[in-house]
Image (spheres, grey):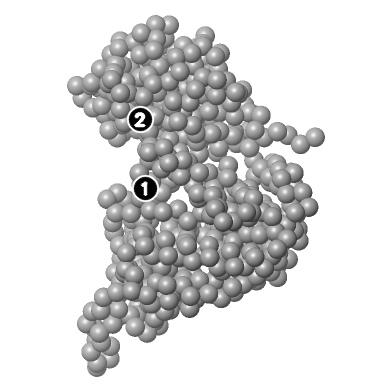
Amino acid sequence: MMLDIHSEKILILDFGSQYTQLIARRVREAHVYCELHPFDMGLDEIKAFGAKGIILSGGPKSVYEAEAPQIAEELFDLSVPVLGICYGMQLMSRHFGGQVIAAGKREYGHAELLAEGTPGPLFAGFFVDGVSPVWMSHGDHVETMPQGFETVAHTTNAPVCAIQNVAKNLYGVQFHPEVNHTPRGEQLLDTFVWQICGCHGLWTPGQIIEDAITRIREQVGVEEVILGLSGGVDSSVAAALIHRAIGDQLTCVFVDNGLLRLGEGDQVMTTFGESLGVKVIRVNAEERFLSKLTGEADPEKKRKIIGNLFVDIFEEESKKLANAKWLAQGTIYPDVIESAGAKTGKAHNIKSHHNVGGLPDYMTLKLLEPLREMFKDEVRAVGEELGLPHRMVWRHPFPGPGLGVRILGEVKKEYCDILRQADAIYIEELYARGHYDKISQAFAVFLPVKSVGVMGDGRTYEYVVALRAVETKDFMTAGWYQMPYEDLAHISGRIINEVKGINRVAYDISSKPPATIEWE
């Protein structure tokens, strides 16, 4: 009998912290299924969810403010273990009669947590010689203890930084265990979901695949499915997973928009058509996309032009597949979270998502989203388990609009061809010099400006490309990758010598924030 991988799950209530998705990812890394829901989830919904444990996230508000986010009061009476993080701990403290006040000294960044008394089961092994380094981000603190709780730790600035009521399985921490800056934070979250909540780790790549195959077969039956294959990680893994489930009932439509990386279209056809035996229809649409983009320099408008034209072409092809009843998409869990946040007004829209929002009204196909519950790292792990090439599964993120948003301003074929060659040299050298797997995302950007140069005895007036490489764990913040000078010099030399039209290479040393990772 197949295991129900959703039978053990953790509920995370989101109070608006920038780190909430990280909490979910850490729980998933412990091989336990979890879901994010808004803080105002009703008590009946919470009961119906059937969580083995509940985590209350941090948030930007103060619990004593009139408009501060609150939760269903009866949540703490459900006999379910609860862990409150930052705002979540303050909310728990206030509920049980503790006092939360504005701190005289705020704590942002590194702090030393000092143990008090005897740490309970959650904190076993968390302190070494009574101390544990943690990451703080708060301007309020608990001044007086909640009834029935005991203090586990403090810092020199905050009198209460960890609390517990072991009898009721209620725990709170003022710090952020989900971030990498808290070295033993992962251990603490593992202890919560395994030891305190009694989960066993059913959420593994192999069992995710088995579960997905079963659900795909139940949903689709004998009907046919079409999928828009972009060559990116998400659509590629979705295609491989659906093909594993229903074989020739799946047809992929690969729209080659002329905005892909060097040789990418041929690679897609080779991997899926020849190696995996997936039915793939290739549509060469470079001229149509470039024509639509003529004269347009605004990044958001370019994204919408590319996305809308893709839908138009895909619809044209889908009409030729009259028997198809399902449209498959590579939607993943962060897309779902961010899309829901945008709809409820609880998140800011930085740029348009190309694969969220359902189907146009005029399309009658049913929607199939087999990756909808997965984070990107889980998608990659599933892809490898399905036998996709390592370089395809673990390559750096590539935006839906492709080179259309890595060419600043108007998009022209000349610019695409130049950028493709420069980017290919850059990535080739990152692999050759052992940098690629240390970098979270790397790419070249085409700048539509010309600069004066000298080649041989002649003056040149040619284009500029910028190279971007960042390190990040969550893509919410990122630091620029500190490439050795000799490697940068070699890469720059190759690009200038081998790519006609470029005479200058720049290296982007901006962090996120204030810059974004992509330039558009």
Q: Is residue 510 visible from the viewing direction of this image?
A: yes
Q: Is residue 398 visible from the viewing direction of this image?
A: no
Q: Quadrant of the N terminus?
A: top right
The amino acid sitting under disc 1 is Asn
Q: Residue furthest right?
A: 1
Q: Position of 400 compared to 505: left or right?
A: right
The percent position of residue 141, horizontal first and vertical second, equals 29, 20
The amino acid sitting under disc 2 is Gly
The percent position of residue 116, horizontal first and vertical second, equals 37, 14
Q: Secondary structure at mark 1?
A: loop
322 or 350: which is nearer to us? 322
**Which residue bears the numbered disc 2?**
59
Q: Check the image and report above or below for 231 versus 73.
A: below
Give the quadrant of residue 402: bottom left
Rendered residue at 52%/60% (across/down)? 395
Labels 2 and 1: the sequence-earlier one: 2
**Which residue bears the numbered disc 1?**
349
Give the quadrant of residue 56: top left
Classed neighbour count for the residue bearing mark 2: other residues with Cα under 10 Å, few (<14), some (14–19), many (≥20) = many
Rendered residue at 25%/17% (across/down)? 101
Q: Check the image and report above or below for 202 versus 362.
A: above
449 or 225: which is nearer to us? 225
Q: Residue furthest top?
A: 147
Give the quadrant of residue 115: top left
Which disc is residue 14 wearing? Answer: none
500 or 36: which is nearer to us? 36
Q: Secondary structure at mark 2?
A: loop
Q: Check the image and report above or below for 111 versus 359.
A: above
Rendered residue at 43%/45% (across/down)? 474
